[in-house]
Image (tube, rainbow, N blue to C red):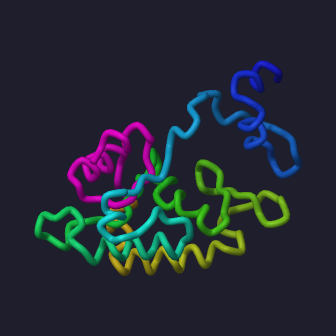
Amino acid sequence: MPNVVEAVGEDRMAIWAEADGGIWTLPDLVNVPGAQSTAVRKDWLDQLGMEVPDTWEEWKAYWYGVRDNDMNGNGDPNDEIPISLEMGATGERSLHQLLNAFGIAASNDAQFCIMPGGTYGFVYDHPNYKAFLQEVRVLYADGILDQEFATRKATDILNLMGGNLVGTVFAYAEQCAVQS
């Protein structure tokens, strides 16, 4: 695979390695580093006197701050959505973006993951999955997680961003740069 290595680089090839060190599939050959990212409203962070979050607890503090304040300044303290997520083509992505915060490195369809010790298994069997579900349940109940997260499409996310209504999204970096 020297042509693939040359096209995408050693670092990206290493990411594709499975637990046994072998590379058995190539997810894609699109060489767009950082194409998708977590976008956070820096202006809202500044209003709250916060830095960009690094830990789960810091993210939650930011999201609760968004929920509890009229961040967009339109006079309606209840229209901001602290975090909105896209459902993906078949619903597989809706909570996928939050799994990494619990040490769950999931496949694109959020069905499989690398387990502690390097084996590969179902996401649902990961030792941190129960904590993930409990935390997401609280975020949803507290109005932090978009109440429509399971049905949001990419265009919905863009509309929320363009409408000055959402504090955090996982989207293409280009979209995040032009939306405000």
Residues 49 and 78: in front is 49
Q: Residue at x 39, y 75 (%)?
A: 140
- Quarter of the picture containing the N terminus is top right
- Residue at the top extreme? 3
Pinpoint residue 74: horizontal percent, then vertical percent: 12, 64
Q: Is 106 placed above or below 77 here?
A: above
Q: Is 125 placed above or below 177 here?
A: below
Pinpoint residue 84: horizontal percent, then vertical percent: 37, 60
Residues 144 and 24: in front is 144
Magenta run includes residue 173: yes
Q: Residue at x 53, y 63 (%)?
A: 98
Q: Residue at x 36, y 76 (%)?
A: 64
Please tell me in which quadrant of the rendered image residue 66 appears. Answer: bottom left
Q: Residue at x 28, y 78 (%)?
A: 68
Q: Is 18 placed above or below 104 here?
A: above
Pinpoint residue 35: horizontal percent, then vertical percent: 51, 38
Apparent side of residue 163 relative to residue 84 in the rendered image (left or right) = left
- Residue at the left extreme? 75
Magenta run includes residue 177: yes
Range drawn in magenta: 151-180
Residues 43 and 82: in front is 43
Please tell me in which quadrant of the rendered image residue 77 appears. Answer: bottom left
